[in-house]
Image (cartoon, helix red, strand yellow):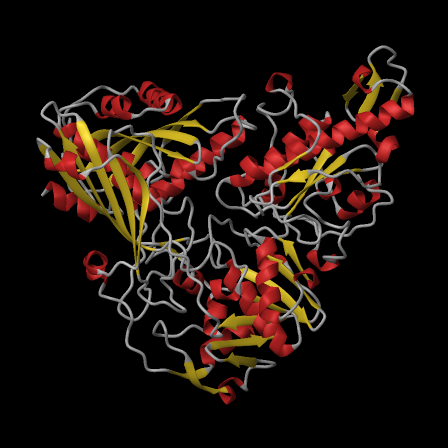
Amino acid sequence: MNMQINRRGFLAATGSLTIAVALPGGKAKAAVANSRVPLKPENLSSYITVNRDGSAIGWVGKVDMGQGTEIGWAQMVAEELDLPLARVTIVQGHTNATVNMGGASGSTGIWRGGAAMRAAAAEARLVLVGMAADKLGVAADTLVASDGVVSSKDDPSKKVSYGDLIGGRQFVETLEWNKEIGSNLAVKGKAKPKAPSDYTIVGKSGHRRRDVADKLLGQLEYMVDVKVPGMLHGRTIRPPVAGSVPTAVDEASIKHIKGAKVVWEKGFLAVAAPREWDAIKASRALKATWSDVKPPFPAMDKLYDGIRAASVIQRDVDKQKGAIDEPFAKAARVVEAQYEWPFQSHANMAPACGLVDARKDGARVWSATQKPHYCRDGIAMLLGLDPEKVVVASMTGPGSYGRNDSGDVCMDAAVMSRALGKPVRVQGMRHEGTGWDPKAPASVHTSRVALDADNNVTAWYFESKVFSKRDAFNNEGDPAFTLTGQLLGVDLKPTLIFGGPDESYGFPNFQKISNIIPPLLDRSSPLRTAHMRDPGGPQVHFAVESFMDEVAYAIGVDPVAFRLKYVTDARDKAVIKAAADKAGWQPRTSARKIADGDVLRGQGVSYASRGGTRVASIADIEVNKASGQVYVRKMTVAQDCGQIVNPDLLRMCVEGNVCQSTSRALHEEVRFDEKNVTSVDWLTYPILDMKEAPMEIDIVLIDHPEAPPTGAGEAASRPTAAAIANAIYDATGVRVRRAPLIPARVKAGMA
């Protein structure tokens, strides 16, 4: 590790700064204590502290969910403070130690969180240099800072350290902050951050993550390791038929289990016991009668027909240019296709865990949530407490990309703790986490283009018919956004939204529409939808980029050349060219069907943008003729996300995107019957395993140090499925328009 830190050393280094924060790696039972300073987004001290030894702490109100964002924040702070990276520590997410910066979502870790920390660190450096000028009696513009020491350019003997200037005390200066951006804070001060040409830390490789060693050595304290005195273990009991609620509970059925207790409030039913195994036994032994409800779901094979036939409750024109009716009426030819995407589960590597100690005067919460400040707000609302009386310690969990089941277990624990008067730890089981987590929505997408006599595209129409991607909001800041709250009967607060494709195709006329349909079950549903990595992006761009290939082949044009003809943004063109060059793309105007014995080989291209980040992917695949099995042998990815902070970690982030989105493309599909979700474990919800992962992921990073970072956590997920589907077509001549691209579908197409 670049740096070793423990609580004792941390507190000793802070001198007179009186705080107590549960740092990752320190025992959580030691306390989530009183707030270190008055936390306000306009206070410089809310973001930066300088210790008595001249080292610094960056206080980040976001969380690193496993991608290494923490080291990126540290690099940005160290760069602006002119400190070695080893002398900067990051504390993230704790609600009593950091301001709300929106948690982790929207690829905003570096884009928003890093930008705020950069501005705050630059301001802190300006203040420190000003303090040094006063102390040394020289002009500020004659001073330089290095390694935490400010010295005179004219007389190096005149110097003073950061620690001597302010160590152990708080900055009193204020910053401007953009209230309209809200929790994704945009702050700035009087200082101008460094020019990229002056960087010595940002943009450089070799800065390693600080969490890996503890993870490898089994020394990191995960959420599941947290224990507090007197706590009980809780288990929530879900109904056999989705939408059913308990009507009678036989508490005598668990009297033989020592210390087991029942918590039953309206539709919420749970058990708790001093020992975890006893809680598990009680959850299995408790006898309950459930309300008789009509099974809420259609047959699995009727899902897409049901989506097509469903009523539309909201229609959004996501983007439009010109008029499309006339070009289609006059078209020499129309190309049209329809694509289908299933429900998908977060399927975290471990089910969620949360611990809540709810009392009349406040509550303490330990959670691996992506959004600790919203977790605080939701639990405060449930318990009727002032949010300032609820403290959430941000712990490391199994990883998360979106609104998973972590919000539900903390809310469950809060209800149980309130009822039983003790801290309660709720740990889900595999079948509960995968079965009842919020899902990415299923969808049907229709795309058509009008062509003139010269095969030029004159109009493009794209329509999604989908479930809203926010049945449950992308944070747990309100009980209505959790299963717990819905079981307690709170008012529903769905957000009807989906969104269209994001690319720079410059067709002269186009219209992109989202048609939102009602949920299959509006309350307490295992198929309720919420944000999953790149919400809506993979399914939309599977349809868009598969279709662009279809159009290119329909008019006898190479798929890469077709995209380059119609993409208008120079940076978008650059990523497409970079990926094609790196992958050794050979132009073609029809499926090549390259055969090698029992194997067919193909190559497919796809492109998308996301919030200013551009990505192009090329998949090299093999298809087994007999089985239809698809193997992704190589993925070539070119990405432009503006300024690169840490090239090594960015490559790892792209690799993670590719592996996860390959899994979603080839395997992942939530299955259900009329009563409930049946995909509840790794057999019924298989994911990509190591032998199926791409053998090679070749990455081209296009750096724009003059531009702000635009987020890298999700963009590379967008093009993967279409690149694979287009490669399947190149190998077999078969168009698979329904995800996942399972062997049976490929084999049926070849037949």
Q: In this view, does 738 lie above or below 2?
A: below
Question: Which residue is painted at 61% across and 54% down in the image?
Answer: 373
Screen quadrant of the C terminus:
top left
Expressed as whole percent of the image width and height from the top left, the position of residue 130 reads 82, 26
Residue 209 in view in this figure: no
In the displayed structure, does residue 390 sit left or right of residue 157?
Answer: left
Q: Is residue 43 above or below residue 551?
A: below
Q: Residue furthest top?
A: 154
Residue 278 in view in this figure: yes
- State which quadrant residue 384 falls in: bottom right
In the displayed structure, does residue 90 sit left or right of residue 470?
Answer: right
Question: Which of these two is toward me, 741 or 182?
Answer: 182
Expressed as whole percent of the image width and height from the top left, the position of residue 299 reads 22, 65
Question: Which of these two is toward me, 646 or 79?
Answer: 79
Expressed as whole percent of the image width and height from the top left, the position of residue 329 reads 11, 37
Q: In this view, does 378 lie above or below 37?
A: below
Question: Which residue is painted at 19% across and 59% down in the image?
Answer: 309
Q: Is residue 406 above or below residue 741?
A: below
Expressed as whole percent of the image width and height from the top left, the position of residue 20 reads 77, 52
Question: Which residue is painted at 86% across and 31% down in the image?
Answer: 165
In the displayed structure, does residue 146 sit left or right of residue 74?
Answer: right
Screen quadrant of the N terminus:
top right
- State which quadrant residue 694 falls in: top left
Give the mark count: 0
Question: Which of these two is toward me, 130 or 24?
Answer: 130
In the displayed structure, does residue 370 sit left or right of residue 595?
Answer: right
